[in-house]
Amino acid sequence: MYGMEYPKLKTTIENKILTIFLQDEKTRNALSLEVLQELSSILNEASENKEIGCIILASALDNVFCAGGNIKDFYKFSILEMRNFQEALERLENSIEYNKKPVIAAVNGYALGGGNEICLCCDFVIASEKAKFGQPEINLGILPGMGGVQRLIRHIGFLKAKELIMTGRIIDAYEAEKIGIVNRVVPHEKLMEEAKKLASELIEKPKLALWMAKNQINTAREADLKTALLLEKVIVNLLFGTPDKEEGMKAFIEKRKPKFS
């Protein structure tokens, strides 16, 4: 499955980093049912693959990450067809958010509609200075359907979420960074280099603790403070019984770099 090329996707794996490139020039990387299914399948397999330490989602096209859904398809959709599409969207969301590996979005250009919603599911978003973000669905008489409303509220708060969703305004990478959609903005030509640098840094961390950190932070968005604090205590207690804890603390005491399993 890795190192392969699909009709609208291609994958590469190097130094335990799986990179998935969207490459549908005709639709500007629109999210068809086929693309959603292929992406979910690749991500789910990567989650269980011990030879993969981190995943990068990127685009093979110039200045376009993902333009969202295919409006020509949507125009013809019945309610039932839209429901089937939504279920495929949900499977993709879950394959990113519940993935055992960190998932980085490397955004080189327009990330609109479903493209922005993919970014909201990812653990990290590195953006080129040329990147653009937005939820312009309201201009089509619809609303975000891949969790965009709920995730934007949780990412940036009610007021900014209302602004983006109710106006359909498209923002640049620097504003996206300022309001909390993007981790950092980098020069366009250094985008993949910076994304791989972050991936390499994450791969060096203890795998179980990294996965637990991701789960705990994602869960905390939904849980009340008391429940989140209890979960935090339970996870820390569990990690104290792992070989990685022994190695990490021993390496600190011995003033050397740890060698995690």
Image (tube, grey):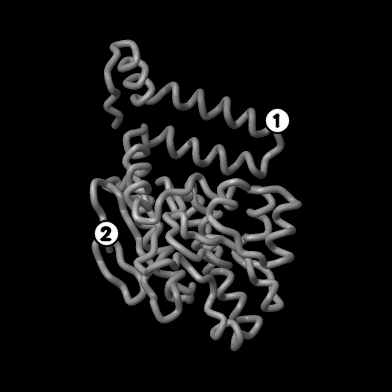
Which residue shows up at 41% across the image and 81% down it? 26
Q: Is residue 167 left or right of residue 84?
A: right
Question: Dot 2: within a 10 Å radius of its alpha carbon, few (fewer than 14), some, or many (20 or more) residues?
Answer: some
Identify residue type, mark 1: Lys
Which residue shows up at 27% across the image and 59% down it? 12
Query: Quick one: quadrant of the N terminus?
Result: bottom left
Do residues under tags 1 and 2 come within 8 Å of each other at their CB atoms? no
Numbered badge on residue 226 = 1
Q: Position of residue 130 (x, y in %)?
A: 47, 59
Asked whether 245 or 198 is in front, the reply is 198
Q: Is residue 126 left or right of residue 86?
A: left
Q: Where on the picture, by quarter, is residue 227?
A: top right
Asked whether 215 or 32 is in front, the reply is 32
Q: Where on the picture, by quarter, is residue 207?
A: top left
Would you name the residue on which mark 2 appears?
12
Q: Position of residue 230 (x, y in %)?
A: 63, 28
Q: Position of residue 70 (x, y in %)?
A: 53, 79
Q: Where on the picture, by quarter, is residue 117?
A: bottom right
Identify residue type, mark 2: Thr
Q: Earlier in the sequence, mark 1 or mark 2?
A: 2
Q: Is residue 248 above or below residue 217?
A: above
Which residue shows up at 27% across the image and 47% down it? 16
Query: Quick one: quadrant of the C terminus?
Result: top left
Q: Secondary structure at mark 2?
A: strand
